[in-house]
Amino acid sequence: MDRLATEVVVEVGTEGASYGLYRERTADGFAYFVTLSDMPYPDDDGATGVVRNSPRVASFEEALLLFDQEPFWPILSAVRVHPEYAARVLAAVEARLPGVEPRGRRKDALRQWRETCWRAER
């Protein structure tokens, strides 16, 4: 995979792991995929990191369904959002947050997503 042709669409993180939706340029436009990178805690003897990639799909909407396999992504820390997708990512977060527990994290998560998406668009 050519790293220069792969771009972050949205990336979230939590302690020891990141979860990202990426796009890569193809002859027909873009292919999308989801990656989970899980790093072991320092006290995990001999544990190694795990990286899992989803199959490629042809649309952002299909990739978002793959991303939804981690139902807590809207309350994880927003790391990066591609400027072209900021409004669509924010809309996805707003649509999913009402169903995500714990409720106490929703307000803070929404504020963080709005800031991250706003910065991405600038």
Image (cartoon, rainbow, N blue to C red):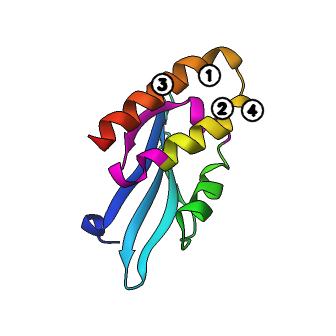
Residue occupied by mark 3: 43
Separation of marks 1 and 4 at Cα, in angstroms:
10 Å
Give the residue at the far bottom of this rendering: 27
Q: Earlier in the sequence, mark 3 or mark 1?
A: 3
Compare residues 108 and 48 and report the one nearer the observer.
108
How many neighbours does mark 1 have within 10 angstroms: few (below 14), some (14-19), or many (20 or more)? many
Q: Report how far apart the C-alphas of labels 3 and 4 lie in the structure.
A: 34 Å
Q: State the separation of the CA atoms marked 1 and 2.
A: 6 Å
Q: Mark 3 touching mark 1, by CB under 8 A?
A: no
Q: Is residue 74 one of those drawn in magenta?
A: yes
16 lies left or right of 25: right
Residue visible at 70% across and 18% down in the picture:
103
Given the image, on which type of amino acid does mark 1 rest? Answer: Arg
Nearer the N terminus, badge 3 or badge 2?
Answer: 3
Residue shown at 42% from the left, 84% from the top? 28
Q: Which residue is mark 4?
A: 99
For label 1, the residue is: 106
Residue occupying image coordinates x 75% and y 32% = 99
Q: Which residue is mark 2?
A: 97
Circles 4 and 2 in contact, beta carbons < 8 Å: yes
CA separation in Å, label 3 and label 2 = 33 Å
Alpha carbons under labels 4 and 2: distance apart:
5 Å
Look at the numbered discs 1 and 2 and tell me whether their residues touch, using CB distance below 8 Å: yes
Three-letter amino acid code of the residue under disc 4: Gly
Image quarter of the C terminus? top left
Q: How many angstroms separate mark 3 from mark 1 (CA)?
A: 31 Å
- Under mark 3, the amino acid is Asp
Q: Secondary structure at mark 3?
A: loop
Q: Which type of secondary structure does the marked residue at label 4 adopt?
A: helix
